[in-house]
Image (cartoon, rainbow, N blue to C red):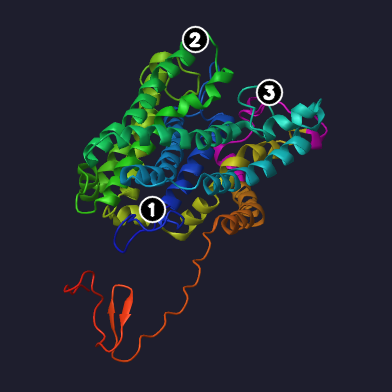
Amino acid sequence: MVAPAAGTSAAPSTEKQRVPRLEGIRGICALGVVITHTAFISGLVGSYDSPPTNMFAAALMSGFTVSLSPFFVLSGLLLYRPFARASLSDKPGPPLGKFFTRRVFRLLPAYYALTLVCLFALNLGAVDSVWYVLRPLVLMQNYDAVWMAGMDPTWSVPTEMQFYLVLPLLAWVMGKLGRTGKTMDQRVRRMMIVPAIMLVLNFPWIIYLHWGHLGPYPKEYFWPFAQLGVFAIGMAMAVISARAQLEPDRVPALHRVVAAHPNAFWLVALALFVVNCFSPFARIGYFDFPYAAAAVVQLTTFLLWGPAVVLPLSVPGAASKFQDAVLTNPPVRYLGRVSYGIYLWHFAVIYFWFQNGSMFGNDPVGVTEFRGRNSFLELITVVVLACVIMATISYFLVERPLQNLSDRFTRPAPPAPKPPASEPAAGAKTVGSVVVPGSVPGPVSATPGSQRE
């Protein structure tokens, strides 16, 4: 994240410091994902032949399906920005060894902890080969699809990791395109070609998935192509942000608008949320797998909601007391700090709550079998409290220690100490690097007869 300057949202400083507002939005969005799933499992939201228990509340809960969008947008923005800055300034990009080390230590330790717990506490009876254990460890569960209890939301981990792997290649292509431009404006426009292609390709892929011939939730649904658009938008935002950092006297038009009206973007996000609640071409209050028309509307909402939320939090000068009040209070910031664990553990917590798995002496079944067993308020209370506890344990015992270890591996080497300069003799004058005895000390001369500080 980028450290904010005083009175601004996010002025450029270092990519490693925490931004309270971005930390807060992660916490809120993680809760949004938990709300979405518990609303479905509790039966509050309808599904196919099971009607919602409360139509208005079910429609409201449907809106939270956009909650994942900011995570992918932030990945594109924050991870690509150093590459974009290097391309625009015609300098070498970030060292790939350090980049991949940080990404691996950020993403995999907490995920592996969850995987091992789910494998041996919930799915032990299903272990029939070494590959069953290795499949999630090598992030192949999206392709060789086998359902595993408690691992339901982890499709996004391979998606994120594969984006990390391909990002340097995308950065190389965008850098090649950008360096053909003679001016900064030309470089920016040419670098936008790749994100534009990614964004456009997202729509035919979604139409293909939802045309009806593959059935509901095919394995291809969880492939990373479905998230091309949100990553692309984040990368486009990174190009604009990098240009603003390199030319601080030329504020991009988008940044000027965001800085002048930050709350207006959240109003747009609210309107998009309402559209998602009452999505056209879909049944209101139901979590059915939509057909193509409804899927396109939902994708459009998903693509727009993330940047509408994130832009006011990432543009320098976009100060909002309302957004600060919502996002920077200590409870929300703490939720953001442990948000990855909340996201990872919430399904496993639900399986443990229903005593559904090997350690309880039964073969686990899908959570749809337990729909309606608990009210939404009861289930969301249990899941949130348990998730925060599990996420806290994960953060302090797994994530934070290993991130600190990765910082040690990737910390720049301290500069070598300079040898002490020898003192010129009294009355000597320095010309270039030559000491002329008998002259009066003065400023270094670049050329004979010139005096420059």
Residue where numbered disc 2 is placed:
212
Amino acid carrying mark 1 in the image: Val
Disc number lying in front (2 or 1): 2
Residue where numbered disc 3 is placed:
146
Q: Is residue 374 magenta?
A: yes
Residue 387 position in % (x across, y down): 61, 46
Q: Earlier in the sequence, mark 2 or mark 1?
A: 2
Q: What crowding class fits label 1: few (fewer than 14 Cα within 10 Å), some (14-19), or many (20 or more)? A: some
User: What are the residue bounds of the magenta stretch?
Assistant: 358-383
139 or 263: nearer the viewer? 139
387 or 439: nearer the viewer? 439
Q: Quadrant of residue 254?
A: top left
Q: What crowding class fits label 2: few (fewer than 14 Cα within 10 Å), some (14-19), or many (20 or more)? A: few
Assign the C terminus to one quadrant of the image: bottom left
Q: Is residue 313 left or right of residue 26?
A: left
Amino acid carrying mark 2 in the image: Gly
Residue 292 position in % (x across, y down): 42, 14
Please, what secondary structure does the residue beneath circle 1 have?
A: helix
Q: What crowding class fits label 3: few (fewer than 14 Cα within 10 Å), some (14-19), or many (20 or more)? A: few
Disc number lying in front (2 or 3): 3
Tell me the tag on residue 326: 1
Amino acid carrying mark 3 in the image: Val
Q: CA distance from mark 2 to mark 3?
A: 22 Å
84 or 284: nearer the viewer? 84
Please, what secondary structure does the residue beneath circle 2 have?
A: loop
Q: Is residue 348 left or right of residue 3?
A: right
